[in-house]
Amino acid sequence: MKNLVRFLASSDHDVARAVRHVRQQVRSFTLPAPRPVVVPMRMAFEAAREAYYFGARVLVCEPHFKSHCAQYGKGVRTGNFIHYIQGRGDIILGDNVVLDGKSNIFFAARFCDRPTLRIGDNTGIGHNCRIIVGKSITIGKHCRIAAGVFLLDSSGHPSEPEARKRGQPPSDAEVRPVVIEDNVWLGAQSMIFPGVTVGEGSVVAAGAIVMADVPPYTVVAGNPARRVASLRTEANRADAKKHSADDAGRRSVSDSAS
């Protein structure tokens, strides 16, 4: 059989050349696509596809995901795939949270009784994100988490070489909560390391590796991520001054009371 295939593929014999010619004709064969015929066919296919995906989302994917949640608000929605959730922990969602595509959520049981993932109102998480929760990961309101983002509050292995060689877990001090504050945009394939806080209104560029806190209203990019721009406007500054004045007023009232 192998010799026959080689003969047909490479020989100059008339039979082999004829077979190759027929094969090429078959591979290049095409039909016309008159619109009165193909447009209704396409519309019927798309309607059937949408009905199938709607049923899969509403009847299978969303109920499966919500069954893992300790609490969820109104309008929580998933995509057409079942998210992969491993381990035991609490998922707490606000209103109108969207987890599109398929993402992986892993809870580690050795660091606390109920590791917790919190996601605020009106936040969207894209396809193929990975979230590893040893203690706590908090994502604020109105956040945009692009596809392929990796958030972790534990690296899974100790940084101390001998402990890692012995197969020990990371120490308690190496498991540090991650906080994504409100209205943050994490670009595709970015990675947020343990202990990091990404400040309100900030943008993390695609592919950035964030190993230190990001101030509010800042754009960071690179590996490791560095500040490349500020997003502060006059309105932001006025709001920040107002918050500072309010905090100072509260402190002075507290000091007077004491």
Image (cartoon, grey):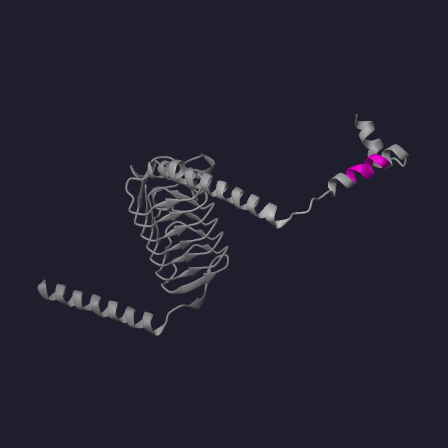
The percent position of residue 16, horizontal first and vertical second, equals 86, 34
Q: Quadrant of residue 131?
A: top left
Residue 194 locus on image (x, y percent): 39, 49
Horizontal relation, residue 126 to residue 138: left or right: right
Residue 10 left/right relative to 158: right
Q: Answer with left or right where residue 188 lies relative to residue 94.
A: right
Q: Is residue 83 visible?
A: no
Residue nearest the observer in this picture, 248 or 184? 184
> Which quadrant, please, contains the N terminus?
top right
> Which secondary structure dominates the residues rendered in magenta?
helix
Point 74% across, 40% down: residue:
27
Please tell me whether residue 255 belongs to the stretch shown in magenta. no
For the C terminus, which image quadrant? bottom left
Tell which of 251 and 23 is nearer to you.
Answer: 23
Confirm whether residue 48 shows in the render.
yes
Q: Which residues are drawn in magenta?
A: 18-24
Q: Nearer the viewer, residue 17 or 114?
A: 17
Q: Is residue 183 above or below residue 162?
A: below
Indicate whether 61 appears above or below 126.
Answer: above
What residue lies at 86% left-to-right and 37% top-to-bottom? 17
> Which residue appears farthest toward the bottom when viewing the image?
234
Residue 130, position as x, y percentages in the image: 44, 44
